[in-house]
Image (cartoon, rainbow, N blue to C red):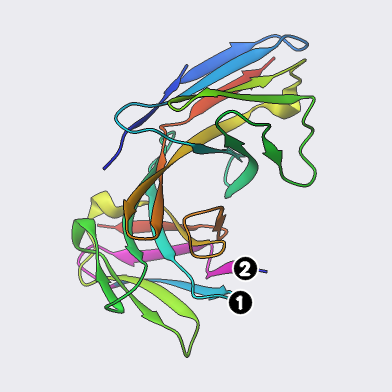
């Protein structure tokens, strides 16, 4: 299967600072990437859909000015958490969409980034 | 709108016993269905998927699932549980059946007793 990496794997920051998380598709071109957030003991919630060369589409309730997404190339999407606060502490997971068969695209998951805001 | 319901947030079985994790979905279009496993502090790993064709799908680590349209179900089974199967399991459905947005169930934590 296709490989997606995330960097960093974990990050600790002070409240009020900004944090950038990178998501890379290593062996395929991902025109679409998705960003999910997972709080402890909870399921994954889709935050936004990132399309290469265009603005991201945010899910209802997700602040686009707080969670800045840039998909500047076919292999890289970044999520910047601006002015982070303790409630933003979570596990952030990205996926890359790759065509694996006729009419079917599959999401390949990154390993996740653990963000802790002090 | 698509949705996924996993019955039972926590399932406990003995080693060697049958594993059955339940998943029901709601979709207005033919669904693509997935089961993922997540170990602590790790990302998700695909166990198996149903897109089209055979309704009984075999996955990794001895797991399988059967798509039953009449019951709108996609339950995950494994004949004999192993200690290493202890993890969180998520059922998911795609929106529109074209590998778009994934809608996840609430997750089921599987515990395996020796």
Q: Residue at x 41, y 35 (%)?
A: B42
Please identify the quadrant where the C terminus of chain B is shown.
bottom left
What residue is shown with label 2?
B2
Identify the image quadrant of residue B40. top left
Please identify the quadrant where the N terminus of chain B is shown.
bottom right
Q: Is residue A16 above or below residue A70?
A: above
Q: Residue at x 31, y 79 (%)?
A: B55
Q: Is residue B21 above or below residue A5?
A: below
Where are the magenta residues, as a range? B3-18
Tell me the crowding category of disc 1: few under 14, some 14 to 19, or many 20 or more residues within 10 angstroms, Cα based. few
Label 1 resides on the chain identified as B
Q: Residue at x 51, y 20 (%)?
A: A22
> Quick one: which residue is furthest to the bottom in this view?
B70
The disc at residue B73 is none
Identify the image quadrant of residue A6. top left
Asked whether the residues under the numbered discs 2 and 1 touch, taking CB atoms below 8 Å apart as contact, a structural biologist would say yes
Residue B21, position as x, y percentages in the image: 41, 69
Say which label, 2 or 1, has the lower sequence index.
2
Label 2 resides on the chain identified as B
Tell me the crowding category of disc 2: few under 14, some 14 to 19, or many 20 or more residues within 10 angstroms, Cα based. some
Q: Is residue B18 left or right of residue A112?
A: left
Residue A55, position as x, y percentages in the image: 68, 31
Q: Nearer the viewer, residue A71 or B106?
A: A71
Q: Which circle, 2 or 1, is nearer the viewer?
A: 1
Residue A81, position as x, y percentages in the image: 69, 21
Regarding mark 1 in the picture, which secondary structure is present there? loop
The disc at residue B28 is 1
Same chain for labels 2 and 1? Say yes or no. Answer: yes
Q: Nearer the viewer, residue B80 or A73?
A: A73
Q: Is residue B6 magenta?
A: yes
Residue A17, position as x, y percentages in the image: 73, 9
């Amino acid at each position: 299967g296709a490989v997606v990496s995330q960097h960093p794997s974990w990050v600790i920051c002070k409240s009020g600072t900004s944090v950038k998380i990178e998501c890379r598709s290593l062996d395929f071109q991902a025109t679409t990437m998705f960003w999910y957030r997972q709080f402890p003991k909870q399921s994954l919630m889709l935050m936004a859909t990132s399309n290469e060369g265009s603005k991201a589409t945010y899910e209802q309730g997700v602040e686009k000015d707080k969670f800045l997404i840039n998909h500047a190339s076919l292999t890289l999407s970044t999520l910047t958490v601006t002015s982070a606060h303790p409630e933003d502490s979570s596990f952030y997971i990205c996926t890359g969409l790759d065509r694996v068969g006729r009419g079917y695209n599959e999401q390949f998951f990154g390993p996740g980034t653990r963000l802790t805001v002090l | 709108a698509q949705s996924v319901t996993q019955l039972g947030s926590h399932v406990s079985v003995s080693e060697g016993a049958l594993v059955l994790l339940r998943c029901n979905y709601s979709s207005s279009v033919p669904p693509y269905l997935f089961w993922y496993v997540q170990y602590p502090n790790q990302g998700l790993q695909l166990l198996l998927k149903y897109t089209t064709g055979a309704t009984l799908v075999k996955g990794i680590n001895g797991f399988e699932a059967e798509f039953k349209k009449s019951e709108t179900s996609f339950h995950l089974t494994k004949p004999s549980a192993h200690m290493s199967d202890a993890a969180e399991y998520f059922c998911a459905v795609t929106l529109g059946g074209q590998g778009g947005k994934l809608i996840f169930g609430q997750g089921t934590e599987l515990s395996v007793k020796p």
